[in-house]
Image (cartoon, rainbow, N blue to C red):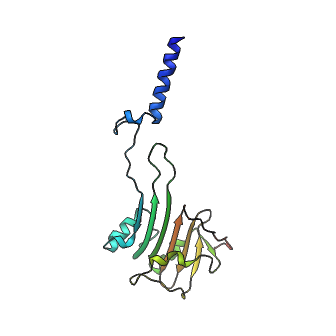
Amino acid sequence: MGKIKRILFAGIILLLLHIGVGCSLLTSDSLFFREEIDRTTDTWSSSFDSIEERLVFLGEYLFMFSEVLDAEYHIVFYDNSGGMIPGPSDWDIRVALHIALEDIPLWTEGMQRLAPGQIDVGLWKELKSERFTWQESELVEYWKRPNSKVVLVVFPESGIVLKMATTTRMINWPELIFETG
């Protein structure tokens, strides 16, 4: 009976080491740990000196459906992929983009149009600047990606697209009112 207890005890110790409870005994180059870059950030576009730097950083957190001429943004990203128990990451990304007018359909493809005024443009007010602005009096279109927390406010006469993608904000998301075709 003593031999069985020793085997069970050794098995439990190995299991605990494998799942990380004994991680202090393991080195960082152990097979049990992956080296990953932590993408956690709280970054404003104003922290970059050039348009190129702003756009390169933005491209690491947001898929670009077309060329972007300029952008202002605030990216809050919590990288939860590392650690003992990895999980899904969380983010709150608000972006004001200037794109070519002919590229607007690339950004709204697969989205559903909302009734006018369904999204509060004030969510992007911190991104307005002398260099980057839009007029609320312009023609405005509102869009939402189905089954997600991604919305767009599009100013089709100036090529300004306000985009928000979030997993963290508690917002009363507008209901889709009609399909685009």
Q: Residue at x 68, y 74 (%)?
A: 178
Q: Please tell me which residue is depicted at 48% across the width and 46% down the height of the picture.
A: 86
The residue located at (56%, 86%) in the rendering is 139
Q: Is residue 30 something one can see in this rendering?
A: yes
Residue lying farthest top?
A: 1
Where's residue 146, x and y in %? 62, 65
x%, y% of residue 96? 46, 75
- Establish if 137 lies above or below 56: below
Front residue of 118 and 62? 118
How many numbered marks appear? 0
The furthest residue to the bottom? 137
Image quarter (top left, top right, bottom left or bottom right) of the C terminus: bottom right
The answer to which of 48 and 109 lies nearer the viewer is 48
The N terminus, quarter of image: top right
Q: Is residue 101 above or below residue 5?
A: below
Determine the image quadrant of residue 115.
bottom right
Which quarter of the picture shows residue 122? Answer: bottom right
